[in-house]
Image: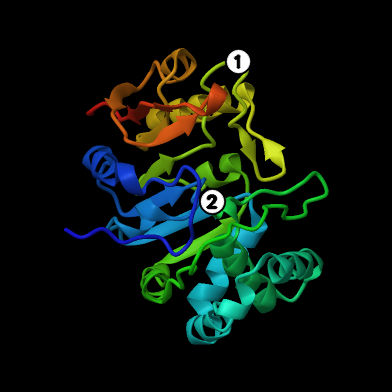
Amino acid sequence: MKKNRAFLKWAGGKYPLLNDIEKHLPQGECLIEPFVGAGSVFLNTRYSRYILADINSDLIDLYNIVKMQTAEYISAAQAMFVPANNNAEIYYQLRTEFNQCREPLRRAVLFLYLNRHGYNGLCRYNMKGEFNVPFGRYKKPYFPEAELNHFAHKAQNAEFHCMSYEDCMAMADKDSVVYCDPPYAPLSATANFTAYHTNSFSPAQQAHLAEMAEKLVSNQIPVLISNHDTPDTREWYKAAKQFQVKVRRSISSNGGTRKKVDELLALYRPAKP
């Protein structure tokens, strides 16, 4: 079956892993995602309802606007995707406007413009909370109209919350399935792939996420977590059934070389009564 792409470009997005994730995601009524990101899992699964969260308020505000003001949003966003706006000078002007803007619809429109015109679709903020991704130099940035419409349609059965992973996981009940896609654990002590919004996601938080998964499964709520396959993640998720997934995604390391990185899926499935 054809997969639905997210309307945002997103570092670490789960589109390439969808077949493996779907294979291991348990059945349930409600899917809860504490780290929704671009929403590839949400867009390609068939639960009756969804509770989707992220600590990035720009992302959640955007999703609620796309859900509630679909036609108005698409019209305003499409107007930004013209050749005149695809140059560095205009990009940096609009990035400055975004960082000063407090009007929700305009800020959401600018967020998609920056996502599609910025370097590698990154979403990165400085310590002041200002978006600081440089211009991407793409020939013709794609306007994701079909993807926006599909997202808006699916979103009618979803609620979006700007909240921590702890608060989101606390919303799970016996009808829920929880899928966690936390910021990647570093591949080594020196690797720095953990920046998440303006905060970093520490090893202590990674371990705490695993503890919360163990607590939920003891209450008969299944949890699936995806992460890099490292000795640390194997240890954190030792109470889960672990599946190594081969992915084509490459991460650049020292000297500009690129290496394949394996992913780990950790499934906490309740014991049968």
Give residue 120's mark.
2
Q: Which residue is mark 1?
A: 189
Residue drawn at x 65%, y 58% as measured from the top left: 135
Instruction: Name the side, left or right, on which 39 lies relative to 102.
Output: left
Return the x and y of residue 214 as percentages of the image width and height. 44, 26
Label at residue 258: none
Q: Is residue 19 above or below residue 148?
A: above
Q: Decide which of 271, 22 is in the foreground and name it.
A: 22
Distance from Cα at disc 2 to Cα at disc 1: 25 Å
- Give amino acid for label 2: Asn
Q: What number of labels is visible? A: 2
* Residue 216 can be seen in this image: no
Q: Earlier in the sequence, mark 2 or mark 1?
A: 2
**Residue 140, x across and y down, in percent:** 48, 69
The percent coordinates of residue 77 (x first, y second) are 56, 79
Q: Is residue 187 left or right of residue 242?
A: right
Could you say which is closer to the camera, residue 104 or residue 130? 130
Residue most extreme to the left: 1
